[in-house]
Image: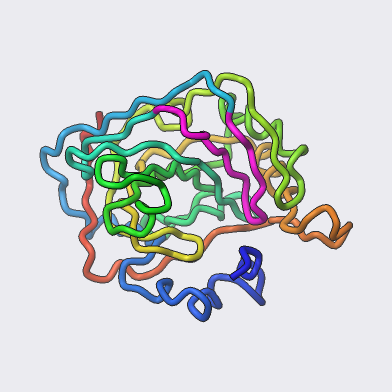
Amino acid sequence: MAENDWGYSCENGPATWTEKFPEARGARQSPVDIDTSRASSGGSAPPLKWRYSVNHPRSVVNPGYCWRVDENGYDSELRGGPLGSDVYKLQQWHCHWGAVNGEGSEHTVDGRSFSGELHLVHWNTTKYNSFSEAAGQPDGLAVLGVLLMCGKKHDELDKVIRLLPFIQHKNDKVTLSDSLDPVKLLPPHNAYWTYPGSLTTPPCTESVTWILFKEPVQVSADQLASMRKLKCGEASCGVEAMEVLHNYRPTLPLGNRELRDYSHGN
């Protein structure tokens, strides 16, 4: 099925995804509302640990529904916390946002939405040989989720946002040659919630251990406005290419999944 058969409009938005992607009906779907009264204490799991490569060329891509930064296979490591002894590697990171400030995060916290959400997508290199293999397995992926709130400009993220005018249309791609430290995308305090979930875009595979940081990170109103200027069509569509004003999936029921709270952070 073609990638552009789904999106966020009335015709192809999240309410229609289950027709073409049956896994989107599952009991382990994401995002969810983080009901803090339901979260059980995570206890004394080993702290989350990460290590990322800073100086390597990355690709900034418009897949038609967001902006995405591809790590191009460079070395990185995420382990600890709910991931046990398995080692996960950063594949790509991307963003979701809303048409107006104050909406756009995929996860909500006690019903509250934020202005956007950054997802750092990792795959389990201990058990699987490739991202695509891992993406089909229940413990294949781990996603760090960072809630974005409207406030002051985010300097590290701006290295990507400055390039968005060059990837206005679907399938546009540029190289980010500046050094960039993914650690600077994460909040200073590392307390988080975790639960078993899914990809929030089709095929909505139920393969993700979600790790959602409690502390939001600030981005500016101008930075959010730049994201909304991206278009979901190719340049050949001309002026009709619609802007990606919002690209978040509404929350789904947590059901009987365990939501754990690691408040000690690192």
Front in this rendered view, residue 228 or 56 = 56
Q: From which residue to which does the magenta span run? A: 58-75
Quadrant of res 22: bottom left
Report the residue that reaches farthest toward the bottom. 19
Name the residue located 66 percent from the left edge and 65 percent from the top edge. Answer: 4
Q: Which residue is nearer to you in this view: 263 or 195? A: 195
The answer to whether residue 25 is above or below residue 176 is below
Q: In the rendering, at what x and y percent does residue 264 appear?
A: 21, 34
In the image: residue 139, left or right of residue 14? left
> At x 22% / y 47%, what residue is drawn?
261
The image shows residue 10, relative to residue 188, as above or below, that is below
Q: Which residue does the image show at 31% across and 72% down from the upper left? A: 27
> In this picture, is 94 found above or below 46?
below
What is the x, y in percent for residue 157? 58, 31
From the viewer's perspective, tell me whether residue 231 is left or right of residue 49.
right
x%, y% of residue 44? Answer: 11, 38
132 on left or right of 168 = left
Q: Quadrant of residue 81?
A: top left
- The residue located at (49%, 41%) in the rendering is 92
The way the protein has been coloured in the rendering is rainbow
The kind of secondary structure the magenta stretch mainly shows is loop
Q: Would residue 179 be counted in the magenta stretch?
A: no
* Vertical position of residue 184 compared to residue 196: above or below: above
Q: Quadrant of the N terminus?
A: bottom right
**Picture coordinates of residue 183, whole percent (x, y):** 42, 27
The single residue placed furthest to the right in the displayed view is 238
Magenta stretch containing residue 60, yes or no? yes
